[in-house]
Amino acid sequence: MSAWNAAQRADFRGPLDVTRAATAVLDAQDMVIGWSPAAGDLLGYRPQEIVGQPLGIFLPPRPADALPPLPPSEGPVPAPVATFRGNEIRVARHRDGHDLLVATAVCPLPGPGAAHRVLVATELKDLRVWESRLALLHGLATQSPVGLAIYGTDLRLVWCNVAYEREIGRPFDEFRGLRADELYSGGRFITRGYPRTLEAVMRHVLDTGEPVLDLHFLGRPPSDPDTEHLWSCSYYRLQDPDGHVFGVCEDAFDITDRYKAQQGLSLLVEAGRGIGTALDVLVTAEKITEVAVPEFAAAVTVDLATAVLEGEVPAAGGPAVMALVRVAGRPAGDGGQPGDGGPGGPPDSEPDADSEPDAGGEQGVGGEPGGRGDARAARDAPAEPPGQRPTVVYPPGSPQHRSLSSGGLVLDDTTLVVPLRTGNSTLGLVTFVRAADAATFDSGEIALADELVARTAVSIDNARRFTRERTAALALQRQLLPQHVPRQSAVDLAYRYLPTDDLSGVGGDWFDVIPLSGTRVGLVVGDVVGHGLQAAATMGRLRTTVRAFAQMDMAPDELLTRLDDLVGQSAEEQWGELGSLDGAFDDVTTGATCLYAVYDPVSRRCVMARAGHLPPAVVHPDGRLSFPDLPAGPPLGLGGLPFESMEMELPVGSLLALFTDGLVEARDRDIDHGLETLGRVLGDRHASLEELCDRAVAQLLPGGTTADDTALLLVRTRELGTTQVAEWELPAEPVAPGRARELATRQLQEWGMDELSFATELVVSELVTNAVRYAAGPLHLRLIRDRTLLCEVADTGHTSPHLRHSGDDDEGGRGLFIVAQLVQRWGTRYTRSGKTIWTELAFPTTE
């Protein structure tokens, strides 16, 4: 007898089996003539006590209303001689007098002899337990959703249940004896750390006796060869009570739906981590391709409307004719960078109007996925014109065109097109493509794709809105800060500007370099309380005001006084409007700080004043560093204290550093330490200004991050020597204009500028004549040869000449009008001793 048969007999013998049950042999008069040891154990009678006694001693007759017959048992009940009949539930009496509820069966014994029939009995509870076990085995074999299979020691199939049979899709007799890898060809385990084949796993279980639990196997069952299924498999070794191994059992449960749901959830979690983390349209579009390939699709492309890249909403109307731009694409197997095209190659440019669709109904890129560009490069160069990206044209009949026309998703074989929609606007399309031999998108996957695209659409719309706001902010900043500082004869300069709000790129600090009359230059640095667009708007007002006052040649202390008055007036107006609807938009002008300096390259004198700002750093040509003890003055808008100027001489080659507190002050660093570091950096006399700027930012703002807006302006002073400047003192007499003409003409001849003699004579004559007529002496005439020819006449008067149109019968009043026509610019600046009228004449152009 084989080990399998022994195990089968031990497992399936019932409690009414003649070899296990209490057995009594009866004659024709129901007298006991045979008694088994099991009967003695059940009823307590020894053979000598019961043999020859009637059946009724231990099994009284069943009354008419007694228990009903025992229902027939499911499954085989082995009988050694014949079939037992009349299964009944009876009440038996034990030798000691107590009753037992038993199940009985009777089998007649044909043939000669005294033995007429055999009675078998067992306790009812034992029969119920056996029936439960038998029902369990029957359920596993016929009703369980878990596929059960038993393989022999040769790893060939010897038995399987109905669920396993359904997976194979054929009757058991047709695949009995096959190996597991023959039933599931091409399958593989996706759980790491185990052999790659079913046979190798079962061989390991047979050899070691170690069970393998919840091993995930991916394959195509013969019943559904077009779809990959995932099973959770367990393996354990089978052996008989003597320890002989006779096979291995496989439990397999199809978890494909659960696996897909887990994959979808993981995909959404990954999308939540990646999509929308950057406020950049191109980066956001690239993220969905990273998430979806290759877990969800073989290739993904993202096409957006041109208006979206510019921060605008696509125009309402027929979406089918919307101009789309390919912004992201990723084919399967890509190593992390978006490809230049999918299975169909890169997208074509917009076709000519005369070109015709091909037979497939597609033109340009058609329905094939593709892409172009790197998200990181796109982020670093967000201003790339949409025209430099490939324009995508989808002809009528393509899935993309149908999606644009209907505004809904379209499934076409292995291509799924989902529109990017927010509200009533269609921003673009996302196209998912699977390989030709892959399964099509099912309803769950379509819903997952719709959810992925919906999240992406919200993030792209947020990035689009941010792009629009940031573009407006940068446009404002470009208007507020100098984008190009023209070269100055007075100084060489370099600057750095680092706003705290690196998203919008705007801040409240500012600097400025203002050309002034007489080749002088105004140097400004300021700091507005707060950050972002609101601070930048306030900064723009202050910068514009400072430039306007500087052009009036105000002294630094006077300029700050005027500026403080205007800020104070603005604060009073704001307090008066706190109850208005716009009161939440507070002005941050009050408390702003400013430093204003004027450097004259002729006298090498620098006059400066500050309103609550840090003093500048001065590095002399010999390397000596100082922070001038410049009177502080209150921040703007507070009032109460006057502003004072300080004048100092700066030798040629002196370095002047103007900066805001964001450069030298930090939460983890004392301001004195920051000033010391800045002075050490500026002490390098051989470094250029650009190098010094870079070093200062690198050492004081490591990583380029700052908790406050930062502005740094470095200037190195220059000098206009005697070869460029000529100056004379004249008496306030009628002969002065003639003398002035002679001096100016002679000087122009020395400079080789005879072409300007005529115009210069007219200008000098008119200005000196007016000074003699309307002011007092002495008079000073000065010519400066710079990028233009500057002519200045100073007197002790404080009245400014006015340009006017003279009538036909007027005898005078036309001189200043003629001067204004000859020169580029002219103006008046006031000094403590009087005023100076200045003009600028352009040099003749050489062709």
Image (tube, rainbow, N blue to C red):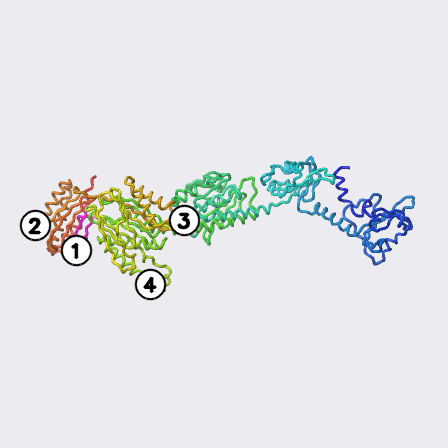
Looking at marks 4 and 3 on the same chain, the residue that comes earlier in the sequence is marked by: 3
**Gap between marks 3 and 1, in whole Å?**
55 Å
> Which residue is labeled 1 in the image?
800
Q: Which residue is mark 4?
A: 575
Q: Which residues are magenta?
A: 822-841
Count neighbours of disc 4 (C-alpha within 10 A) and say few if under 14, some if 14 to 19, many if 20 or more. Answer: few
Residue 9 screen position, x and y as percent: 77, 42
Q: Nearer the viewer, mark 4 or mark 1?
A: 4
Percent position (x, y) of residue 169? 66, 41
Identified by mark 4, the residue type is Trp
Q: What's the residue at 58%, 46% (across, down)?
A: 259
Q: How far apart in space, not on screen, are marks 1 and 2 (Cα)?
A: 22 Å
Magenta includes 506? no
**How many neighbours does mark 2 have within 10 angstroms: few (below 14), some (14-19), or many (20 or more)?**
few
Residue tagged by mark 3?
A: 307
Q: Position of residue 524 (x, y in %)?
A: 27, 50
The residue closer to the viewer here, 521 or 284, is 521
**Disc 1 element:** loop
Which residue is identified by label 2? 735
The spot of residue 730 in percent (x, y) is 10, 49
